[in-house]
Image (cartoon, rainbow, N blue to C red):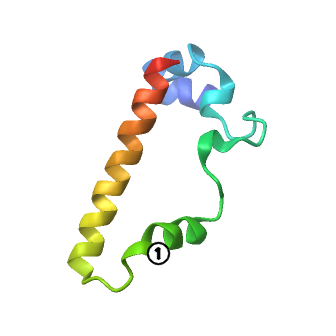
Amino acid sequence: MQNIRQICPEGAQWLDQHDLEMWTFHKDGGHRWGIATTNSSESINNVYRECRALPISAIVEMTFWKTNRWFVNRLHWCEKR
């Protein structure tokens, strides 16, 4: 945390205002905030499962919109807390 304070005091102040469970992996009690796996390849395979036969441009577009939706959903969820 000291390194963060030296690099970005504003960021450290923001982190201080939020519970450790919200922004640290080691303090979240194993919940991972709705993420079912820590394995990156499992996560990506899960994303691409429904579009494997599509052209690459469609896969890239689907990945963009799905990721965008995840961020928006998590943003709204965090704002409610």
Count the numbered circles shown: 1
Bin the neighbour count of mark 1 within 10 Å (Cα to Cα): few under 14, some 14-19, many 20 and up: few
Residue at the farthest front position: 50
Task: Name the secondary structure under disc 1.
Answer: helix
Relative height, residue 2 to residue 43 (above, below): above
Q: Position of residue 4 (x, y in %)?
A: 55, 29
Q: Residue at x 61, y 29 (%)?
A: 22
| Image: 51 above or below 43 | below
Identified by mark 1, the residue type is Arg
In the image, farthest residue toward the right? 29
Name the image quarter holding residue 57.
bottom left
In this rendered view, identify the residue nearer to me: 17 or 54.
54
Residue at image coords 35%, 56%: 66
Residue identifier under label 1: 49
Horizontal and vertical percent position of residue 63: 33, 64
Q: Give 35 or 49, whichever is nearer the viewer.
A: 49
Q: Is 32 drawn above or below residue 44 in the view shown?
A: above
In the rendered image, residue 81, in percent from the top left (x then y), is placed at: 53, 18
Please indicate whether residue 66 sits to the left or right of residue 6 in the image. left
- Image quadrant for the N terminus? top right
Q: Residue at x 41, y 46 (%)?
A: 70
Picture residue at 59% right of the left edge, 16% below the top: 16
